[in-house]
Amino acid sequence: MSLIYLVVFLLLAHFSPFIIAALILGVFLSMLIEAPQKLFSKVMNSKISAVLSHILVLGLVLYAAITFFPVVISEGNKLFSMLSSLTIPQEEALAQLPEWLVTFINDLNKNLSDFALGLMNQLLSSIPNLITSAIVLVVTTAAIGSLKTITKNNLWKLYPVNDREKGLKFMKDTYSQFERFVHGQFLTAIMVGTFIGLMSFIFGIPSALFLGILAWITDFIPYLGVVISAVPLLMLAFTENGLIGLIIGLVILTAANQLEMWFFSPRIQSNALNLHWFVIIISILLFGELFSFLGILIALPIVVYIRNFWEYFVIKIK
């Protein structure tokens, strides 16, 4: 039965990636709220710690969401103005610069403009799906507390009598490991957000705090998260410091991505999930290839699910 549930989930992930991603992110967000809550509960009342944790996590998410669009629109206007003013007339440039250099500059400006317009069109075309996903995300996060209780009380119905005891233990252990995975991702995202925010501040990119918070939040969104955090960072870097700023922004993003892929995530998640770092990297790459942006999000939970299924129902060591 456990294998059938996995197949059904993968089919849903394939045909409804936005909805499944929103559901998974809703579960992630509810678990993320629990991470600071556990820290706060050590020094204060549990109810107060729960309220503070909700305010902290949801407040940061709301701050990033509210700030994102004004920053992108404002910097986008500056960017298009700068790109337009950078175009050098061919006849004037020939007297000062080699023809190949003038052509390169004009082509570069055109390509950057086309890329920016294409990116904006892509974001606009995804707005209906993103709005639906956002609604599902909010509802899932708000309802997860009661859903946990309902699921816990009715989980036994998923298994026939002969496999019920082992199936329940399998599900509970897998969920517990999934929680450790989310808490590990929480630490990874904090490191990535801190790195991007700190580097932005050091190199004089405006709104460094916003960029760090945005990087922390979007680190949980595969592929699309990189684009979301990269757009305002590169815009702010370019409009503030020109081509040098754009290069610095690209270096910051590349360094953060490499640190996460080869150091932060493998080290933290290998301890949280008891998986070798190489298995983690390969599974992320493989599921990303199979399921696109959703694949990276579900890769490690599915690997843990399959490993536990194999141990419980195939080699039966549990």
Image (tube, helix red, strand yellow):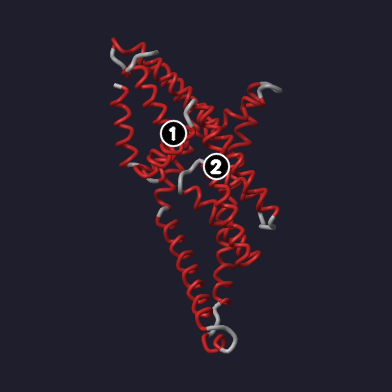
**How many numbered markers are drawn?**
2
Q: Position of residue 120 (x, y in %)?
A: 46, 61
Q: Are marks 1 and 2 in contact (CB under 8 Å)?
A: no
Quadrant assignment for the C terminus: top left
Q: Quick one: label 1, few (<14), some, or many (20+) residues within 10 Å?
A: some
Residue at 49%, 25% in the rendered image = 274
> Which of the labelled discs sits on residue 279, or is there none?
1
The kind of residue tagged 1 is: Val
Q: Quadrant of residue 44?
A: top right
Q: Quick one: label 2, few (<14), some, or many (20+) residues within 10 Å?
A: some
Q: Secondary structure at mark 2?
A: helix
Residue at 68%, 56% in the rendered image = 203
Foreground pick, 5 / 310? 310
Asked whether, in this view, residue 131 is left or right of residue 162, the answer is right
Asked whether, in this view, residue 234 is left or right of residue 162, the answer is right
> Which of the labelled discs sits on residue 151, or is there none?
none
Residue at 35%, 21% in the rendered image = 310
Q: Position of residue 60 (x, y in %)?
A: 61, 42
Foreground pick, 70 / 309? 309
> Which of the labelled discs sits on residue 260, or is there none?
2
Q: Secondary structure at mark 1?
A: helix
Q: Position of residue 233 (x, y in %)?
A: 59, 56
